[in-house]
Image: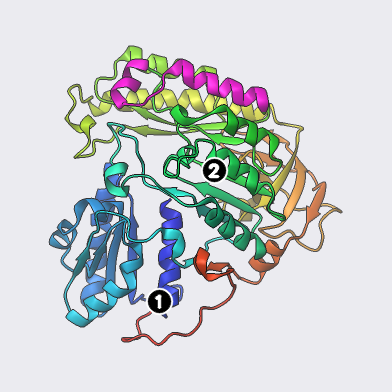
């Protein structure tokens, strides 16, 4: 969600006449789009702002802006702790950034604007997309749940849903510019439709995406187990371009802890969903989120989580040590656990999950996979002479871009088929010759250094290339 919000911020700045600073050059503007889910986000922001102070002192005309969830939470406290910050804006007023920057320049003082409710749906704002082949499409913002550990609802607000026609218009606009894959975004993506009273709106939306000509892959994140219904499973299984990948947050395998977390499902219900998904899609890769060390968690509770992990056979898991967030009910609960206890449990969970993921990945050796070639996914690709891509189930595959099937050269955004030769806990390797290679328009755009810029769903199709020149008072560049 934050990555996509950053695309919207970049799009607005470009529309206002800002241009990206050259690599290595001192920027005139630095924008932080912050998260507040864990405590280390706070520490990271204020530490980085401190490192920026000498640059600000050396160049007083440089502007620093802080937005996102941490800005929504800390508000004016940010400029008290870091008075060299020029602009603070929240999650509900992303569209205010260019005006606030101009106002701060004009008034020569910090501008802080935090709205309590959504000013404009982010999709109506322009976006400079990060990728030429894969795009985020927000279908809802906000959250109606009240999980006791989570600060997001208080910072993002109640759920607001976009109309299906608006979502599909954005999907079609991206595909018209060569994008092959979209990921539908929502804080609880499968609750989509609650605002306009259609309980099957999400499954209908998945099926509608299946009718978009040229759209090869559809993903979504993140669903909530309590609202995950059979019609969604059927839509996933029956819609060819919907990927057999499911990120299903577990958080805990202990029913007692789930109740304390105010998660409205229990372990048996959770596992039954996974059983239904695998019955409909035996090749589905299922990932999850797990919190270790929630207040009052006993060793028995933790063992229940390990038991669910063993049964669920996740292909990967995002594992977190509980982070106390002021303002959440869990922060005031008794039984806050010592760091050393949480760390020891966390290490055991990671070891178990890595072992399961490795076992599951080794089962894929010898299997043919279709990959959408990616940019920057393999840190060692240069030294190993490999490239990297994502399989339809979301797994990361490092492959050798060689063989008679290669048409000139393989580029990010192209589609290839290959055979898995090795399985590791966090990735797969395919070191044989490619079976097929399909050059794509997305690959052409990557090679040309072009990314789509969407102008908001009501303003027509996206366009490629440099933004239109717009006169800007002060002439700053970002």
Q: Which quarter of the figure has residue 119? A: bottom left
Identity of the residue furthest to the top in this view: 300
Q: Which quarter of the figure has residue 259? A: top left
Q: Earlier in the sequence, mark 1 or mark 2?
A: 1
Q: Is residue 381 above or below residue 431?
A: below
Rendered-image quadrant of the C terminus: bottom left
Q: Check disc 2 and report the residue beneath it.
A: 220
x 50%, y 30%: residue: 228
Residue 123: give x, y in percent of width and height.
46, 60
Question: In the picture provided, is 19 more to the left or to the right than 173?
Answer: left
* Most foreground residue, 271 or 427: 271
Q: Magenta includes 17?
A: no
Q: Is residue 175 above or below residue 199?
A: below
Residue 70: give x, y in percent of width and height.
27, 52
Q: Are marks 1 and 2 in contact (CB under 8 Å)?
A: no
Instruction: Note whether residue 327 is visible.
Output: yes
x 25%, y 61%: residue: 49
**Element marked by disc 1:** loop
Disc ID at residue 25: 1
Q: Main secondary structure of the magenta part?
A: helix
Q: Is residue 455 above or below residue 286?
A: below
């Amino acid at each position: 969600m934050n990555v996509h919000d950053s695309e919207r911020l970049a799009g607005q700045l470009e529309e206002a006449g800002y241009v990206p600073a050259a690599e290595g050059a001192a920027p005139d503007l630095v924008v932080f789009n912050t998260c507040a889910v864990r405590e280390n986000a706070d520490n990271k922001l204020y530490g980085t702002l401190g490192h920026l102070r000498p640059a600000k002192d050396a160049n007083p005309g440089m502007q620093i802006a802080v937005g996102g969830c941490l800005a929504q939470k800390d508000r004016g406290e940010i400029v008290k702790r870091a008075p060299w910050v020029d602009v603070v804006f929240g999650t509900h007023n992303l569209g205010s950034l260019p005006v606030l920057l101009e106002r701060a320049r004009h008034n020569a003082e910090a501008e802080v604007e935090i709205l309590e409710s959504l000013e404009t749906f982010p999709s109506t704002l322009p976006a400079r997309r990060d990728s030429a082949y894969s795009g985020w499409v927000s279908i809802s913002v906000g959250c109606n749940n009240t999980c006791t550990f989570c600060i997001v609802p208080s910072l993002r607000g109640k759920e607001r849903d976009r109309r299906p026609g608006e979502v599909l218009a954005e999907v079609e606009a991206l595909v018209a510019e060569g994008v092959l894959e979209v990921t539908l975004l929502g804080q609880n993506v499968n609750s989509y439709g609650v605002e306009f009273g259609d309980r099957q709106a999400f499954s209908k939306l998945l099926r509608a995406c299946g009718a978009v000509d040229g759209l090869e892959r559809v993903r979504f994140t993140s669903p909530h187990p309590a609202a995950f219904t059979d019609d969604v499973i059927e839509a996933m299984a029956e819609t060819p371009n919907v990927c057999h990948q499911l990120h299903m947050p577990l958080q805990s395998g202990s029913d007692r802890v789930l109740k304390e977390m105010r998660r409205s499902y229990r372990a048996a219900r959770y596992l039954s969903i996974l059983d239904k998904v695998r019955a409909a899609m035996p090749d589905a890769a299922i990932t999850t989120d797990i919190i270790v060390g929630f207040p009052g968690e006993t060793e028995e509770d933790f063992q229940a989580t390990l038991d669910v992990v063993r049964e669920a056979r996740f292909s990967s898991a995002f594992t977190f040590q509980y982070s106390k967030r002021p303002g959440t009910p869990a922060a005031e609960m008794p039984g806050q656990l010592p760091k050393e206890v949480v760390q020891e449990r966390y290490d055991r969970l990671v070891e178990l999950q890595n072992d399961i993921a490795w076992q599951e990945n080794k089962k894929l050796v010898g299997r043919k996979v279709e990959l959408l070639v990616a940019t920057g996914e393999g840190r060692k690709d240069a030294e190993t002479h490999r490239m990297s891509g994502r399989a339809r189930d979301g797994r990361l595959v490092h492959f050798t871009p060689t063989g008679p099937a290669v048409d000139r050269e393989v580029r990010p955004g192209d589609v290839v088929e290959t055979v898995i030769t090795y399985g590791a806990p966090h990735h797969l390797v395919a070191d044989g010759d490619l079976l097929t290679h399909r050059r794509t328009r997305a690959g052409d755009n990557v090679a040309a250094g072009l990314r789509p810029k969407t102008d908001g769903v009501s303003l027509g199709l996206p366009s490629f290339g440099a933004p239109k020149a717009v006169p800007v008072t002060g002439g700053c560049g970002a």
